[in-house]
Image: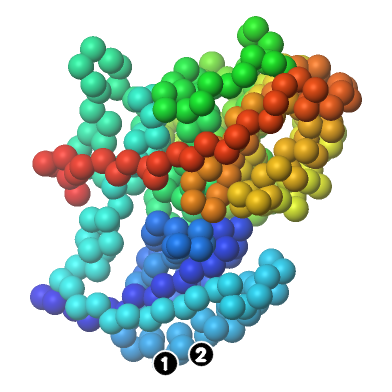
């Protein structure tokens, strides 16, 4: 039996996507999911409501958008709201059909938790890639947004698959980069922590997030994936040190504010992956870390977004300007993620 339902669309800056998701659920959404970014690089959230909710949502969602804009310090015009009536037999199946596995590299695939069948068939003569399964809903991190995808590409490169990426220069990089302990700062859904745990199974992986509700989602995702990653509510303090790899998919302001703490948390020879940066913010961010001794090795871009790979050859007490180690990398554009063709036994 066909059913009318209301689809709400919310487009907003990436750093506010989790707040947007929470607002949609608070408004009574049956489900919330993340679509591909729009042309402005904003996160695009979709939510399903009953058609009787239309008038209420026309009043509530603009108010929610104003609160989010004020909390994150951007203009309300940065948030777009759309309401559209859909007529379909099963709204749940309708949005699920567009949620497909994302192939990050030959080593890693991200798939929706509900995906049936094998989302990552092995190529002939090669082992099957590791699979991270996450819900494309609250505490976003489906792998499709450029900031997440670029982080996972760099993570895969550190694990041994840098195909299609520029070679990282040898300046500033020790012969063997230690990664027994990995930190994911601002873990969200835990997707980067889970990817790290899959790619470096011998490592101790810790995800930190300031939102306890988000931490609960990340822990559930880790359990569902059988991944050896732990999650805590909080942020960096002076006692959390000795990390060989640090991941931080945040925004420019917290990345600049946390630069000294991140440097103190890193051990000599550590690698650092930073994202959540617009293209015109990447150099400012990299320079701040170079002044603390980091070498800027790779700069990946997709649309309006950038991700950086850095290394700390001199140890966490080194103060030499990383720019002395070699030339700054050019921004390398990475194609949009490959969405795998649904297998015949798919959802």
Q: Residue at x 78, y 38 (%)?
A: 287
Q: Quadrant of the N terminus?
A: bottom left
Quarter of the rendering containing residue 293: top right
Q: Residue at x 39, y 67 (%)?
A: 46
Quarter of the rendering containing residue 12: bottom right
Residue 116 image point, x, y percent = 22, 42
Q: Is residue 266 left or right of residue 227?
A: right
Q: Residue at x 63, y 72 (%)?
A: 68
Q: Which residue is mark 2?
A: 59
How many neighbours does mark 1 have within 10 angstroms: few (below 14), some (14-19), or many (20 or more)? few
**What is the number of the mark on residue 55?**
1
Q: Under tag 1, what secondary structure?
A: helix
Residue 151 position (above or below residue 122): below
Residue 70 position (above or below residue 39): below
Residue 200 image point, x, y percent = 51, 20
Answer whether labels 2 and 1 touch (C-beta < 8 Å): yes
Q: Is residue 316 visible?
A: no
Quarter of the rendering containing residue 245: top right
**What is the number of the mark on residue 63?**
none
Residue 37 position (above or below residue 152): below
Residue 270 image point, x, y percent = 70, 21
Work out which residue is located at the far top of the displayed protein and give it: 175
Q: Is residue 13 visible?
A: yes
How many neighbours does mark 2 have within 10 angstroms: few (below 14), some (14-19), or many (20 or more)? few
């Amino acid at each position: 039996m066909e059913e009318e339902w209301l689809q709400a669309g919310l487009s907003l800056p990436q750093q506010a996507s989790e707040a947007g998701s929470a607002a949609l659920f608070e408004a009574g959404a049956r489900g919330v999911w993340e679509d591909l970014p729009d042309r402005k690089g904003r996160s695009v959230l979709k939510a399903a409501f009953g058609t009787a909710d239309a008038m209420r949502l026309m009043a509530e969602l603009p108010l929610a958008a104003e609160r989010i804009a004020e909390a994150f310090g951007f203009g309300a015009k940065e948030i777009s709201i759309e309401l559209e009536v859909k007529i379909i037999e099963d709204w749940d199946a309708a949005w699920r059909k567009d949620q497909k596995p994302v192939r990050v590299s030959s080593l890693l695939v991200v798939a929706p938790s509900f995906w049936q069948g094998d989302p990552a068939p092995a190529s002939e003569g090669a082992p099957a890639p590791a699979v991270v399964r996450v819900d494309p809903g609250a505490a976003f991190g489906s792998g499709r947004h450029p900031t997440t995808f670029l982080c996972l590409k760099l993570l895969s490169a550190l694990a041994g698959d840098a195909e299609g990426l520029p070679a990282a220069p040898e300046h500033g990089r020790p012969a063997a980069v230690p990664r027994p302990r990995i930190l994911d700062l601002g873990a969200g859904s835990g997707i980067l922590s889970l990817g790290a745990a899959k790619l470096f199974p011998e490592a101790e992986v810790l995800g930190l997030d300031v939102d306890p509700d988000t931490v609960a989602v990340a822990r559930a995702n880790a359990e569902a994936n059988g991944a050896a990653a732990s999650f805590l509510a909080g942020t960096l303090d002076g006692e959390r040190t000795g990390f060989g790899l640090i991941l931080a998919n945040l925004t420019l302001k917290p990345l600049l504010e946390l630069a000294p703490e991140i440097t103190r948390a890193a051990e000599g020879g550590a690698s650092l992956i930073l994202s959540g940066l617009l293209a015109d913010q990447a150099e400012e961010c990299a320079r701040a870390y170079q002044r603390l001794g980091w070498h800027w090795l790779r700069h990946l871009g997709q649309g309006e977004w950038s991700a950086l790979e850095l290394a700390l050859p001199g140890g966490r007490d080194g103060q030499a300007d990383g720019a002395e180690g070699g030339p700054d990398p050019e921004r390398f554009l990475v194609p949009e993620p490959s969405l795998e063709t649904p297998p015949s036994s798919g959802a």
